[in-house]
Image (spheres, helix red, strand yellow):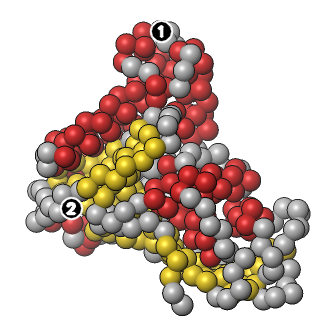
Amino acid sequence: MPRTRTTARAPARVTIIGDHTDYNEGLSLPMAIDLATEATFTPEPGSFLIGLHSDQFPEPWEIPLGDTAPPSPTALLAAGLIRLANAASGGTVHVTSTIPLGAGLSSSAAFSVALSMALGVTMDPIAMARHCQRAEALAGAHVGLLDPLTIVAARAGHALLIDFAALEMRHVPLPDDAAFVVVHSEAARQLKSSPYATRRAECEMAAHQLGRPLGHCEPGDLSALREPVLRRRARHVITECARVREVESLLARGNLAGVGKVMTEGHRSLAADYKVSIPVVDSLVEDLLGLPGVLGARMTGGGFGGCVIALCQPGSPALDPATHAPRRAWRVSPAAGATMIAT
């Protein structure tokens, strides 16, 4: 437990390719970006109450240490993180963030990592990801490891290839001329109120019928699934893992046009086979693909709203956030993972 004021910074996450593969023991290629959440904890010895103030919520939260009474719905995640951190004393937490809520950019995972680190939690990346996953479960959201693992383990200038079967990672260099823009569809998303849990259950059913997790399967296995819905869900996971391998190979050759094409194919699969996109997001993808210099575009995150990421040539007008007004947009770069900040 820290004895002096501590500040931690955790970045947002986007997925270049490989969504809805983490809980299927598949492959993913995300990267951290230069939007971030910062949490500053000031301990108050002898206090058994943590007051949390966030610039994204109008009212502060007061969370007693060791109190098992349910907090307000908006404070469930914070209460779970504080409980798991096993804080020795209370104090005050101030949180600021440039990550929009409900945008598919991992705002909750960034909050989880930043708050945990500010409260003195120190773990290796996989243990920290599992720690944050447990807190999300306490708050009623059963999420995979993709978001917190990326946020902790990312490296500037690189994507992070994650094998969720072996829980192995390697950093993949991104070419200097790979330019990215993130555009908000302005349709907010909430995993707890979306069909996200249904998709997970469908994957579990398909995996049970095939006898192994979908991330371990091949296209030829799909014929064993007689139910069309399960076959489509499995097809997305299997082909998405293949797209991750293809993008890694294309990046090694500097073939950004090929990367963009595969990103767009991934969106088509998420929309048609996995059914996690919505019309406003599909329209945004098409709008972006129609702009000069856009090589590929896809939804990012769990789906059902949120943001689209586009890979662009350096001179593309799509990189200017003003191009997308009144939608919010950010030109982003591959950023480093979470870190402590000197205060």
The amino acid type, in three-letter code, at marker 2 is Ala
Query: Which quadrant of the view contains residue 208?
Result: top right
Earlier in the chain: of badge 1 and badge 2, it is: 2
Q: Name the residue that disc number 1 marks.
A: 224
Q: Which mark is residue 179?
A: 2
Residue at 56%, 45% in the rendered image:
144
Query: Which quadrant of the view contains residue 154?
Result: bottom left
Number of marks drawn:
2
The amino acid type, in three-letter code, at marker 1 is Ala
Q: x, y percentage for residue 168?
A: 46, 44
Q: x, y percentage for residue 25?
A: 50, 34
In the depicted view, which residue is nearer to us: 169 or 200?
A: 169
**Mark 2: which secondary structure?**
strand
Quadrant of the image containing the C terminus? bottom right
Quadrant of the image containing the N terminus? bottom right
Residue at 34%, 44% in the rendered image:
17
Query: How many neighbours does mark 2 have within 10 angstroms: few (below 14), some (14-19), or many (20 or more)?
Result: many
> Is residue 185 in sight in this rendering?
no
Relative to 109, residue 273 above or below: above
Q: x, y percentage for residue 331?
A: 28, 68
**Mark 1: which secondary structure?**
helix
Query: Which quadrant of the view contains residue 44?
Result: bottom right
